[in-house]
C-alpha cells in the first residue's frame, strides 16, 4: 500500500520547485517514508502538501488526487476531486471562504498499476491557501478558555456556515478539524476547509449515484439521516451542516462527544437501528429521492419519540450556569432527530448565541458589583 503515493511524495519533496513556483514542499497528511495515511482522515481522496508560493512568499497547500486510487473506481473518485476544485473557484476573493490559489492542473510521474505494471500517470492537483489557525485547543483544553471566548468562536463558525449556505453549498463535513481561525479585513473569522464532500445544492449527483450506503464525512458529526444512507440527497444535505453545528456547540463545553452521549440513549440506538434496517432494504438507485425520504420519515416518526437528546451539560461540563438553559435549547434546535425540525434559519441561531452571551456578561457584571460592594463594606469596617 502507498506505493504510488510514496512515488508522488518523493517526486515533489526531492525535486525542483513545482512549476518553478512552489518550493519547500512537504507532505502533511501521509507518512513521508511510507506514503501511508495518518490517524486523521483529512483529505480522504487526497495527498496534501505544504509549500511556499515563491510569487507571494506565502504558505500554500497543494492538494493532489491520491494516485493509489488509480484503478479503483477512478473516474468517480476523480470527478469528486474535480468537483472540489471547481467549487472552490466560486469563492475567490470572498472573505469567509477558503481561497483557491490555482485551478486544477496536472503533472506526470512514473507510477505502478494494481497489477504491478509501470505506467506514466498524470497527477491532478490544485492549490489553496494554507491556514494555520487550528481551533482544536478550544475543545481539548476547554477549561482554559472563558465561555465568552468559546461562544464568540462558535458564532464565527455559524457565520461561516451561513456564508456557505448563501452560496447554495452544503459542506457535509463540518467538524473541528475542518475549521480554521484567521484574520481577514482586520476581522477575526473562522473558515471551513476540506471541501472534498461539499456539494452545490442545485447540482445533480455525480454519475448515477445519488445516495450512499454510509455517512458522508465524519460519522461523529453525522445526523441520523446521513447515517442511514441519505447523504447524497440534496434536499436533506444542508441539514447535516446544521446538526454538526450542534455537535460542535456541545463539544466546546464538554469533554465527551455529543454523539458518544447520544449513543448511550437506548431510544436513539433503537431509532437508528429501525431506520437503518428499513432503508437498507430499499434499492436506493432504483427509487426516487422523494420515495426514499418518505420511507425514512415514516419509520422515523414511529420511533423518534423514544429519543432523549443530551443536554448542553454533562458530568464534566464547563457551561456557565447563566446560559445553561439557553444553550441547551439552542443545542436541541440544532440537533433535533428530525431534520425538518432543526432550526435552518441560522440568523435565529445567531440571536440565540447573542442572548446567551448577554446572560453571561450580565452575570459577570452582577458579580463585579457584588465584589465592589463587599470591598466597600470591608473598607468601611476598617475606618
Image (tube, rainbow, N blue to C red):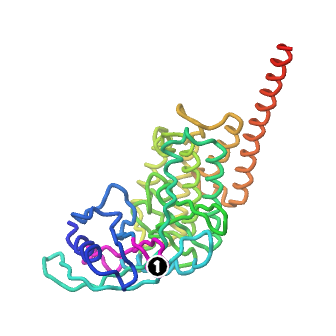
As drawn, is 183 to the left or to the right of 5? right
Name the residue nearer the viewer: 292 or 112. Answer: 112
Residue 353 drawn above or below residue 360 = below
As drawn, is 199 to the left or to the right of 108? right
The image quadrant of residue 29 is: bottom left
Whether the magenta-drawn stretch holds residue 14 is answered as no
Which percent across, then down, holds residue 41? 37, 59
Query: Residue drawn 58% across and 51% down?
Result: 246
The boundaries of the magenta stretch are 51-77
Which percent across, then down, holds residue 121? 25, 84
The quarter in which the N terminus is drawn is bottom left
Secondary element at tag 1: helix
Density class for disc 1 (Cα within 10 Å; few <14, some 14-19, many ≥20) is many
Would you name the residue on which mark 1 appears?
Answer: 85
Q: Is residue 257 visible?
A: yes
Name the residue nearer the viewer: 53 or 89. Answer: 53
Query: Residue drawn 53% across and 33% down?
Result: 316
Residue 21 drawn above or below residue 63 = below
As drawn, is 369 to the left or to the right of 191? right
Name the residue nearer the viewer: 261 or 84. Answer: 84
Which percent across, then down, holds residue 207? 41, 80
Which percent across, then down, holds residue 170? 55, 68
Q: Is residue 240 visible?
A: no
Amino acid at each position: 500500500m502507498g506505493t504510488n503515493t510514496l512515488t508522488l511524495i518523493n517526486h515533489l519533496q526531492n525535486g525542483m520547485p513545482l512549476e518553478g513556483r512552489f518550493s519547500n514542499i512537504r507532505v502533511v497528511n501521509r507518512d513521508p517514508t511510507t506514503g501511508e495515511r495518518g490517524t486523521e482522515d483529512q483529505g480522504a481522496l487526497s495527498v496534501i502538501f505544504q509549500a511556499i508560493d515563491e510569487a507571494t512568499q506565502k504558505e500554500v497547500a497543494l492538494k493532489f488526487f491520491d494516485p493509489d486510487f488509480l484503478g479503483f473506481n477512478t473516474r468517480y473518485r476523480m470527478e469528486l476531486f474535480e468537483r472540489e476544485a471547481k467549487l472552490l473557484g466560486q469563492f475567490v476573493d470572498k472573505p469567509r471562504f477558503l481561497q483557491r490559489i490555482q485551478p486544477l492542473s496536472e503533472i506526470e510521474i512514473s507510477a505502478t498499476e494494481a497489477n504491478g505494471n509501470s505506467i506514466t500517470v498524470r497527477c491532478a492537483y490544485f492549490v489553496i491557501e494554507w491556514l494555520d489557525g487550528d481551533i482544536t485547543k478550544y475543545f481539548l483544553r476547554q477549561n482554559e478558555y472563558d465561555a465568552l471566548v468559546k461562544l464568540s468562536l462558535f458564532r464565527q463558525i455559524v457565520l461561516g456556515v451561513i456564508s456557505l449556505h448563501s452560496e447554495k453549498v452544503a459542506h457535509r463535513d463540518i467538524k473541528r478539524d475542518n475549521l480554521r481561525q484567521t484574520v481577514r479585513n482586520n476581522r477575526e473569522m473562522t473558515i471551513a476547509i476540506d471541501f472534498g464532500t461539499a456539494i452545490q445544492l442545485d447540482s445533480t449527483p455525480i454519475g448515477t449515484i445519488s445516495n450512499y450506503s454510509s455517512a458522508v464525512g465524519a460519522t461523529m458529526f453525522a445526523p441520523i439521516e446521513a447515517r442511514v444512507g441519505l447523504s447524497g440527497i440534496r434536499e436533506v444535505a444542508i441539514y447535516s451542516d446544521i446538526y454538526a453545528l450542534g455537535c460542535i456547540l456541545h463539544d466546546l463545553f464538554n469533554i465527551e462527544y455529543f454523539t458518544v452521549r447520544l449513543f448511550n440513549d437506548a431510544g436513539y440506538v433503537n431509532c437508528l437501528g429501525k431506520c437503518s434496517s428499513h432503508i437498507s432494504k430499499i434499492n436506493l438507485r432504483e427509487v426516487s429521492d422523494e420515495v426514499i425520504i418518505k420511507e425514512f420519515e415514516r419509520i422515523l416518526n414511529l420511533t423518534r419519540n423514544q429519543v432523549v437528546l443530551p443536554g448542553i451539560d454533562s458530568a464534566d461540563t464547563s457551561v456557565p450556569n447563566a446560559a445553561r438553559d439557553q444553550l441547551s435549547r439552542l443545542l436541541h434546535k440544532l440537533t433535533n432527530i428530525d431534520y425538518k425540525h432543526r432550526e435552518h434559519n441560522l440568523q435565529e441561531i445567531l440571536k440565540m448565541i447573542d442572548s446567551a452571551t448577554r446572560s453571561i456578561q450580565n452575570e459577570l457584571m452582577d458579580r463585579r458589583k457584588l465584589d465592589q460592594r463587599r470591598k466597600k463594606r470591608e473598607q468601611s469596617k476598617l475606618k
